[in-house]
Amino acid sequence: MPLPPTADVLIAADCWKAEAEAESIVQNAIATAATFVTLPAEATELAVMLTDDASIRDLNREWRDQDKPTNVLSFPAAPLPGNTTQDGVPLMLGDIAIAYETTRREAETDAKPFPHHLSHLAVHGFLHLLGYDHIEDSEAEVMEELERRILAKLGIADPYLANDQVT
């Protein structure tokens, strides 16, 4: 049975200091999501950057040609040649960035507890690292149903009953 991924959380913006539990919320959401998906047999890891709207706007402009902040961005790691890792070195799944102000604003607009919305965004970003997407309707249905199941395990209501804000 594969090990759950190691999620290294970097708090890269002072605004996240108001959310003392953010790191554990993100790690718990990803660990729970990992029980619903197929992971490589070797150890895996990912990095999550908790940032602000200005930084995520820069990333969104550079990588997606969209000059605006967003709630979450995922950057899957490039596959290793031969799909192998060095002994003792975890396989890097990729990076996730989550913006505080957008996450806070969406949670308030949708009357969702901030920790629930943060959990949703962490799960959403993690699934993107594993190749899930929502560009096509059929892909979106698969991804959203998986998110619902994961979030239900965390005791979080269906986030898609309200306005969908995940990009």
Image: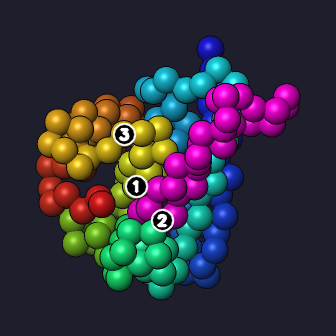
Check contact, mark 2 vs mark 3: CB within 8 A: no
Pointer 1 residue: 121
| Res. 116 in view | yes
Give the residue type that dot 1 points to.
Leu
- Whether tag 3 and tag 1 are in contact, CB under 8 A, the answer is no
**Could you tell me which residue is drawn at 47 percent across and 76 percent down?**
62
Q: Are marks 1 and 2 in contact (CB under 8 Å)?
A: yes
- Asked if residue 95 is among those painted magenta in the image, a careful observer would answer yes
Would residue 1 be found to the left or right of residue 122 on screen? right
Q: Which residue is mark 2?
A: 98
Using the rendered image of the protein, determine whether residue 119 is visible from the camera's viewpoint.
no
Give the magenta part as a residue range: 72-100
Which circle marks residue 132 in the picture? 3
Q: Callout 3: few (<14), some (14-19), or many (20+) C-alpha neighbours within 10 Å?
A: some
Left or right placement of residue 135 versus residue 119 in this view:
left
> Helix or strand or loop: what does disc 2 sit on?
strand
Q: Furthest-front residue in view?
A: 81
